[in-house]
Image (cartoon, rainbow, N blue to C red):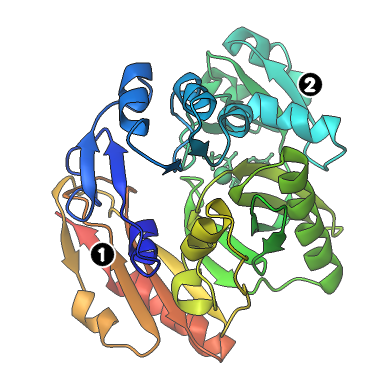
Amino acid sequence: MLIQSGIDFNIPFVVLDPDAQAPCSGIADFHTGKLTDFDTVMNFGSSCDILTIEIENVNTAALKELVRLGKKVFPQPEVIELIQDKRTQKKFYLDHGIPTADFILTENADQVKANKHFLPAVNKLGREGYDGRGVQILRSEEDLSKAFDAPGLLEKLIDFEKEIAVIVARNEKGEIKSFPVVEMVFHPEHNLVEYLFAPAQITVAVKNKAEEIASRIIGKLNMVGLLAVEMFVTKTGAVLVNEVAPRPHNSGHHTIEANITSQYEQHLRAILNLPLGDTRLITPSAMVNLLGEPGYNGKALYKGFEEVAGMSGVHVHLYGKKITKPFRKMGHVTIIDHDLDSLKKKVDFVKQTLKVIA
Ligand SMILES: Nc1ncnc2c1ncn2[C@@H]1O[C@H](COP(=O)(O)OP(=O)(O)O)[C@@H](O)[C@H]1O
Ligand SMILES: [Mg+2]
């Protein structure tokens, strides 16, 4: 999706990805290699003018060396390092007075178990968790057997009213601009986004707080690029930061069709030090993640594609991943509609009709 957007700016892309079948393998100068390997990243980066990274699990020592050699690397390796670990992220929020759920750092399962007074809580892996895979909700003592036996943290379970996200961009000149707040609805068991609405149905006070927090974080990080800030809105209207991601994000996919500037174009503008684009929403919109249907593993088939593609205001994105697995992100659907009720009906129809099976 970043490459799609970059074509409009006439930018040639070179890509490094560990998966030879990666969705972009056919549309860019594509190289297969391990992102965590120093030499691989160095060799790859030496041929580029500007590097950007869409995953946190990358060799930051190599990226720092590339900066030393004069390459532009955005987001900066130091920012990636800070965000790579949910533990250092949480410490950053504390140090900068950014509201976040109370937490305890834990080194192993025994330390989680020793803190049962902290329940109900959420046990998170420090590193390498994504799409809910490094997150366990521990409601009572019986759940303690699920504790992660690796460095992580134990965070108070927030009885939130809503989960929202703000995507904010900053260029090298220091200009900062955020996208309108979106409201995310998570899968009840798998802790990953099932669908989202934009704009979020929140009070002006919550909206202002969320945008202010997102701008403050990207400013304090001195980051260049795009930062997605996931937040909880509590029942009393407080806004707490959950986590951040330094890249285009699932909570911004709808911006391709629904906003004047997409998150991908904004990311390019930020890293190229261009003026940031107008982020206004053109029309209310929703985004439904197309997840691998449970019970199916193997070559992906898309059921209901024509029915969904035939609806007005509906745009299907298939990522071209060959193999489907339960809950794997295989694509997404953007739906736009001026009428919120009709938007919600279309969301339900899309969720019921379009299925990825094998
Ligand atoms: N402290 C918390 N209280 C309540 N729910 C939480 C808490 N932390 C995480 N969750 C739920 O789990 C989801 C995934 O957690 P998150 O830390 O964002 O991990 P990931 O890196 O997998 O996105 C959140 O979006 C939210 O639905
Ligand atoms: Mg998250």
Residue 301: x and y in percent read 14, 60
Above/below status of 334 relative to 208: below
Compare marks 1 and 2 and give the one earlier in the sequence: 2
- The CA distance from mark 1 to mark 2 is 42 Å
Residue 136: x and y in percent read 55, 32
Quarter occupied by the C terminus: bottom left
Per the image, label 2 sits on a secondary structure element best described as helix
Q: Is residue 319 visible?
A: yes
Which numbered disc covers residue 117? Answer: 2
Crowding near pointer 2: few (<14 within 10 Å), some, many (20+)? few
Q: Amino acid at mark 2?
A: His
Q: Residue at x 49, y 21 (%)?
A: 65
Residue nearer the viewer, 257 or 207: 257
Above/below status of 287 relative to 139: below
Above/below status of 96 relative to 350: above
Q: Residue at x 83, y 43 (%)?
A: 99
Ligand 1 lies under 8 Å from the Cβ of mark 2: no
Q: Residue at x 63, y 43 (%)?
A: 244
Crowding near pointer 1: few (<14 within 10 Å), some, many (20+)? some
Q: Tell me if 226 is positioned left or right of 352 in this view.
A: right
**How many numbered discs sit on the rendered protein?**
2
Residue assigned mark 1: 355
Q: Tell me if 91 is positioned left or right of 236 in this view.
A: left
